[in-house]
Amino acid sequence: MNSIKKTTMNPLDQALDARQTMSGLIFAAMALRNKNTIPVKTIPLTILGGFLGAGKTTMLNHILQNPGGRKITVLVNDFGKINIDATMVESQTDDMISLTNGCACCAVSSDLTKTLIDISEKEEQPDAIILECSGVAEPGSIAQIVLSNKAIRLDGIITLVDAETFFERLEDESSQQLFINQLTSADIISIGKTDLVSEEEKQKINQWIAKHQPNKAVLETVEGDVPTDVILGVEADHDLEDEKAKAIKKTNHKHTFESVSFSFDQPFKEEKINAFIKNLPAHIIRAKGILQIDSDLDKKMIYQRVSKRWSLKSDEQWGNEKPISQLVFIANKGTLDKEQLEKSLRACLKHIF
């Protein structure tokens, strides 16, 4: 009969043995957790990029109105403290996340990383994610953040350009490099607002793209009207190391552009706010807002300015929402006089006693 040999361990060996056992249990638990959290499929993400006022929100709203049966999660990034774009998208979807007061490629990159992790760990995942970038963001840098999440698949980068200001952006030293970087990162370049330029001008833009950005797919659009299946389902081949290795000269837009934001809970006088808008300084590259105006207190008025072109259009009713006018102005660093802008805007208010 075999006898059981009893071995006595000294206290040090016992401690080491216990530590190894505990480490094994922890490792096993981690392995089990990882096994349970590895996604069965990746979620396609589309980046909508492009310079300030290129028409990204317009295209995004068109996609949300024509989703083709897809459940879409939307991330909206804005450079200003007030996310005007998110407000204009909110009515089109109940699955929208706002990334505010900085670019997703730098200032709020950690917010984007966390948001993508949260989305990928949801039990009920979306069919697609659309990320609308800030107008001064580098889509290539955002692509690196997206590609770092194995549960997310970068489906494509769509860069929108404004046909009317295309060559203005290329000739402006403050925006030139960023504009070129946005084009270089693109899988598809969408030339928007083509109804505002001549056929000759459109031809010049296409010729420039063919020469300087060869092998890029190019679309021409009006009011962001593009079939959703063209934008979602690009299935471009993006690799993290390739994105890192791309020889793109980065821009420090934090030190190139600045924004100021304002909110008012009193309506504007129509005549005065129109005069303010018409006389806005030419150096303001982009301005946008949602306003309440005394000529129609029940409806929101959407204000858009790109370069020298501006519009003020009636939108949906305020409904149960408290009317608050919000405006954002963006220009080159050091050129915005916040105090003067606020003083001028306050002079346009209709004071209610």
Image: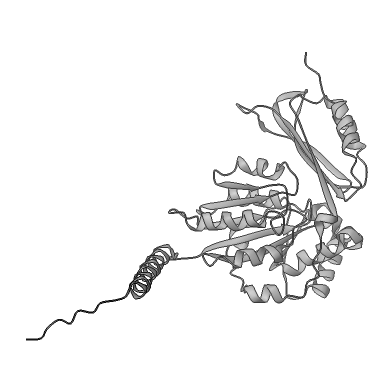
Q: Please state, as top left, top right, bottom left or bottom right, where the N terminus lies in the image.
A: bottom left
- Hey, which residue is sitting farthest bottom in the picture? 1
Q: Position of residue 110 (x, y in %)?
A: 64, 56
Residue 160 is left or right of residue 348, and the answer is left
Which quadrant, please, contains the C terminus? top right
Q: Nearer the viewer, residue 121 or 72?
A: 121
Q: Nearer the viewer, residue 191 or 212?
A: 212
Give the residue at x 63% y 73%: 240
- Which residue corresponds to the image point at 76% horizontal and 69% vertical from the top-left? 184
**Residue beneath the point at 25% across and 77% down:** 8
Q: Is residue 67 above or below residue 250?
A: above
> What sort of colour scheme is used for the picture?
one colour
Residue 192 placement: quadrant: bottom right
Judge left or right: residue 128 versus residue 39: right
Q: Is residue 226 left or right of residue 332?
A: left
Observer-nearest of 265 and 195 = 265
Can I make out residue 191 in this image? yes
> How many numbered circles are shown?
0
Quarter location, residue 9: bottom left
Above/below status of 91 relative to 211: above
Q: Position of residue 247 (x, y in %)?
A: 77, 75
**Residue 6: percent from the left, percent from the top?**
19, 79
Residue 305 appears in the picture as rendered: no
Residue 313 lies, in percent from the top left, at 76, 36
Residue at the limit of the structure toward the top, as seen here: 353
